[in-house]
Image (tube, rainbow, N blue to C red):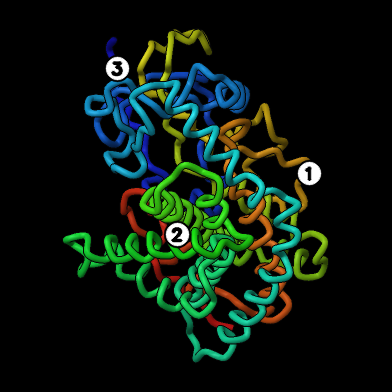
Amino acid sequence: MTTTEERVLLASDEPFVQRLCPHLREPYDGPPVRRIVTPAGDPAWLVSRYAEIKGLLRDDRLGRSHPDPGRKPQYAGNPTYDLATATDHGAGDKFHHDLRKVLQPHFAARHMLHLRPKVEELTAGLVEAFAARPRPADLHAGLSAPLTLLVICELLGVPADEREQCAALVSRMGGVADEEGDGTAAFFGYLRDLAARKRAAPADDVMSRLVTGNDVTDEQVGEIAMLLLFAGIGSTVKQIDYGFLLLANDPAQRDAVAADPDLVPRAVEEMLRVSGSLSLPRYAREDIEIGGVTIGKDELVLLDLARANMDVDAFDCPAEFDVGRAPNRHLTFAHGAWACMGAPLARILMQVLFTRLLSRLPGLRPLVPAAEVATTDAPLGGGLTDELLVTW
């Protein structure tokens, strides 16, 4: 089938100012499903409307597995992001279902409520330490990244006296010194060994649950823990950074949230909606008729969650950043069987952090105007660099 020359962009390729000021985005009035070329150079279908995306997220004719992984069309050309779980759809579905069944209790909203006091404790300590730093300080390296890592370590079951070691191992990964993958291997080795220790002495945490009563090896548990940790860190840290900048760019709404802590949960949902998400890649398992077109079996389908969050048919005045928006049924965490398990944790972490920041450091602001912060076009980088200088 002939494709257009239109190339869908990674979120990091979209001008940062359009994320910060959503009213500057051009409203999308094209077809709900159209042919495009991915950043990896492969043909795909892009779905851009809320109703169609939500329907496909509930459709079992889409999945992550592909019958020929070596030749499958790719979205990003990134091994982690373009991962297919299996060549057999049944095996892929079973893996996905079994993994969610094991992990879901630890990510359920009820369990998150029990975890919240610990999140508040960790947040209070880090915010106080951050407030004592010389100014300007790096919000990303000094607060959003270490807090997210600490909270996920708490959930996984990394012992408190090993978290500095864990943080050091994480920092080695992907850097200049890690060209040969030594940092990745060292971190995986640590998680594999931790899985073995959990098997011998299980506790009430995710890694213990994985090794107890499940037919998995320590290596498999290490791989799952690494995936959970990096999926959680990468997305949550960026959402915190974006959320801070969205509030900083709109002082009236920032002041409204600071004056009414009960408004924080709604404000967090709006941060999540506006900052959006990357296009979610899936593969058609059979022909699918949708939006006036036929998506062919085994073709790549991109679900544009960020565009869905700006659909005028789904949200009133979607181009406005409104911290009081309700209801706010955004798709940043996807939906249905593909809904992000870590969503309750991300929500609690952001709610606790922004409540504490607005009360402890009410004058916190970026060193330069929010629209002028440094950005990057690194693939999957979300548009922001790993430095966010602030003062107060």
Amino acid type, mark 1: Ala
Quadrant holding the N terminus: top left
Residue shown at the point (27%, 22%) measured from the top left: 68
Q: Which residue is mark 2?
A: 195
**Label 2 or label 3, whichever comes before in sequence order:** 3
Q: Quadrant of residue 245?
A: bottom right
Is residue 335 at least partly visible in the picture? yes
Determine which quarter of the picture holds residue 46: top left
Answer left or right for 130 relative to 263. Answer: left
Question: Under tag 1, what secondary structure?
Answer: loop
Q: Around disc 2, counting alpha carbons within 10 Å, would you say few (fewer than 14), some (14 to 19), or many (20 or more)?
A: many
Amino acid type at mark 3: Thr
Residue hosting label 3: 3
Q: Residue at x 31, y 53 (%)?
A: 378
Q: Residue 99's x, y, as percent?
A: 52, 40
Helix, strand or loop under label 3: loop
Q: Decide if residue 285 is on the left or right side of residue 115.
A: left
Q: Secondary structure at mark 2?
A: helix
> With 150 as the anchor, is 72 left or right in this view?
left
